[in-house]
Image (tube, rainbow, N blue to C red):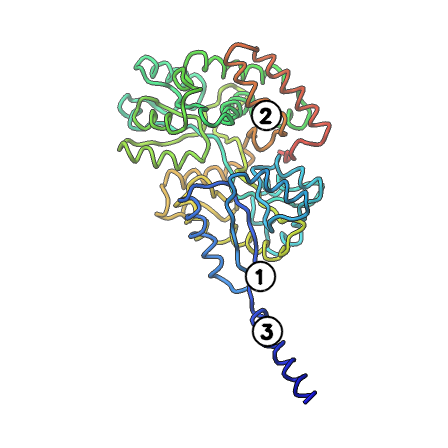
Amino acid sequence: MRKMGALLLALALVISWAPLAGAQETVTWWYENATPDQERIVRTNFVDRFNRSQSDYRLEIRFDPNLENTLRTALLAGTGPDIVMTHGIAYALPYIQNGHLLPLDGYAEAYGWYDRFLPVMVQLGSYNGHLYLLPKSYESMVLFYNKTLFDKHGWKPPTNRAELEALAEAMEAQGIIPFATGNAGFRVANEQPVSAFLNHYAGAENMYKALTGQLPWNAPVFVEAIELLNEYYQKGWLGGGNYFSLTYEDYCTLLATGRAGMTINGTWAFQWMTDFFGQTGQEWDWVPIPALSEHAGYPFYDLGIGATLSINKAAKNPDGAAVVLDVLSSDKEIITDLNRDWPGDWIVPVHTLDAKDFGDKTDPRYARYVEEVADAVAAGNYGYTVWTFFPPRTESYIIEGIEQVWLGQITPQQFMDRVNQIFQEELQAGAVPPTPAR
């Protein structure tokens, strides 16, 4: 009886553990805030397909409108999701420095990430010789314009400052707002025109020198860039004098109805162009931002990273997290479907993606952007967005301080003096994100 009891106990243990032997391991990912439709896009095009594609791992995604604070609290406590998503390199850098993120070198070698991603992206995600970050997508600022309006008046997209200003004056004479833009409901938008004018006036080489401490930010070339931006604002060219009261819905409507002619905006606006112009029946297109001085080349694109992806050092399932990151950056069907439904937010910066991969899934204007910018970045024809390459205190001041310039409370020189002071403090403190060698 004793032997029979032992046998029954062993059999019971085998039965109780049997389901676990083939159970999927869970991989957790905390994602930033998204609309219900955007949540559906991520789940349908990636999460559900990943989970169906294999039997080893199950990806669970959670959308968090307060991701930055939730994530910081969890990581400091030694917990959190397997996949760590941040709003950019400057946000992720303290996590690297404090040992909260896992070096990805072994996974990068095993999965070929070093060869798959554009070299500049590998450099951006590296710190002290180790890879910690993969970009979820990359961004750039471009010039969108109302093509129907341009065709009506015989206007050509500008390539330099003289052409841009002549065009703005012609629009103004017709009662058309030259640049549809505004920051109502999203003050952070202030850094976008600052970023565009610094890059496309001062040029990539000067930006690189300043970011690496070789040139102060209050050098004349940067002050002149802000003076030009302020000149455009004072003329009423930015939002028709209503910059502070226009939401993106407002100014996209102005552009799509022909009451505004152009907007300097980021790649996230591709989805807006489709939505708003689809309601008016008018046509849109885009070109690179014109060269605003002899310092800047044309075409070139100021580069940004929309979000970073890493693996938590305290991850319960780091191997599974690596599989998720690998699929997200290698499965072209997943990437193109995400771009079809959410254009501008899933431009994975890999060598293997070009316009023909999108087929008829996306607007050809968008597919053209993806290919052209990837080629430009690979050739080194890129600049530096504020939200990707600048440290956090400097970025915060730029967002706040440019309003003081526009309102006449400080001069462009005083603004850039303060930008330089804060930046140099952060440079000495090691808070400046890595700037890849050109």
Residue closest to the far bottom: 1
Regarding mark 3 in the picture, which secondary structure is present there? helix
Q: Which mark is residue 16?
A: 3
Position of residue 130 relative to residue 186, above or below, is: below
Residue contact between numbered discs 1 and 3, judged by CB atoms under 8 Å: no
Residue 320: where, in percent of width, then height? 59, 57
Mark 3–mark 2 CB contact (< 8 Å) = no
* Marks 3/2: CA–CA distance: 56 Å
Residue 398: x and y, percent? 57, 22
Mark 1 crowd level (few <14, some 14–19, many ≥20, 10 Å Cα): some
For image coordinates 72% across by 29% down, the residue present is: 429
Q: Is residue 412 visible?
A: yes
Quadrant showing the N terminus: bottom right
Relative placement, left or right, of 115 versus 261 is: right
Left or right? Give the position of 389 relative to 247. Answer: right
Mark 1 is on which residue type?
Glu
Give the residue type that dot 3 points to: Ser
Query: Disc 1 designates what residue?
Result: 25
Quarter of the image for residue 74 reads top right
Q: Which of the two discs, 1 and 3, labels the residue nearer the N terminus?
A: 3
**Quadrant holding the C terminus:** top right
